[in-house]
Amino acid sequence: MGMNVGQAGDEEVISAINTTPLVDVMLVLLIIFLITIPVAIQVVPVDLPKAQNVPRETRPENINLSVTQGGAVYWNQEALDNNTLVERLKTIAVIQPQPEVHVRGDSGAPYEHVGRVVLACQRAGIVRIGFITEPPPRG
């Protein structure tokens, strides 16, 4: 069975490691992995949408809001504070069809500053908000 029992007159010490239990454990682990890996690899078949970067034309009625790295908000070229921004957006929100708000956030600006602009749009009732980004490099 893989076990050596010495004779009564044997005084020799057996220094070999019995590897049978190790082999048994490794074979059990191999069988477990062979059974579970195909189950873990299977995924639900989903038809993922194809991404396309289509440049959009900026219409004159769209509102362009810029957020600087320091947190200053500009309506086109005019600097606004948060309360004035909400009031102006409320007057724009009642126009039918509602114009889009395009937010241009500085890449170094903390998300908190852009989040305040999105919150102001939400409080004013603006439905369509877009984020302007740099296009990825070609090639």
Image (spheres, grey):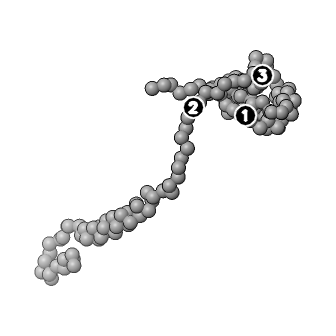
Nearer the observer, 91 or 67: 91
Figure quadrant of residue 52: top right
Question: Amino acid under label 1?
Answer: Ile
Residue that sits furthest to the top in the current view: 77
Figure quadrant of residue 19: bottom left
Q: Nearer the viewer, mark 2 or mark 3?
A: 2
Judged left or right of residue 18, residue 50 is: right
Question: Amino acid under label 2?
Answer: Asn
Q: In percent of the image, x 48 and y 25: which residue is there?
A: 138
Question: Amino acid under label 3?
Answer: Trp
Residue 53: assigned label: 2
Q: Secondary structure at mark 1?
A: strand
Residue 129: assigned label: 1
Find the distance from the CA under tag 2 to the CA under tag 1: 17 Å
Pointer 3 residue: 75
Of callouts 2 and 3, the N-terminal one: 2
Q: In percent of the image, x 69 and y 24: which residue is there?
A: 58
How many residues crowd mark 3 within 10 Å: few (<14), some (14–19), many (20+)? some
User: Could you say where residue 119 lies in the image, as x and y percent from the top left?
Assistant: 77, 36
Q: Is residue 109 above or below residue 8?
A: above
Find the distance from the CA under tag 2 to the CA under tag 3: 25 Å
User: Could you say where residue 110 lies in the image, as x and y percent from the top left?
Assistant: 67, 30
Q: In percent of the image, x 75 and y 26: which residue is there?
A: 62
Q: Is residue 24 above or below residue 9?
A: above
Residue that sits furthest to the left in the current view: 9
Q: Nearer the viewer, mark 1 or mark 3?
A: 1
Of callouts 1 and 3, the N-terminal one: 3
Q: Are marks 2 and 3 in contact (CB under 8 Å)?
A: no
Residue that sits furthest to the front in the current view: 97
Q: Is residue 29 visible?
A: no
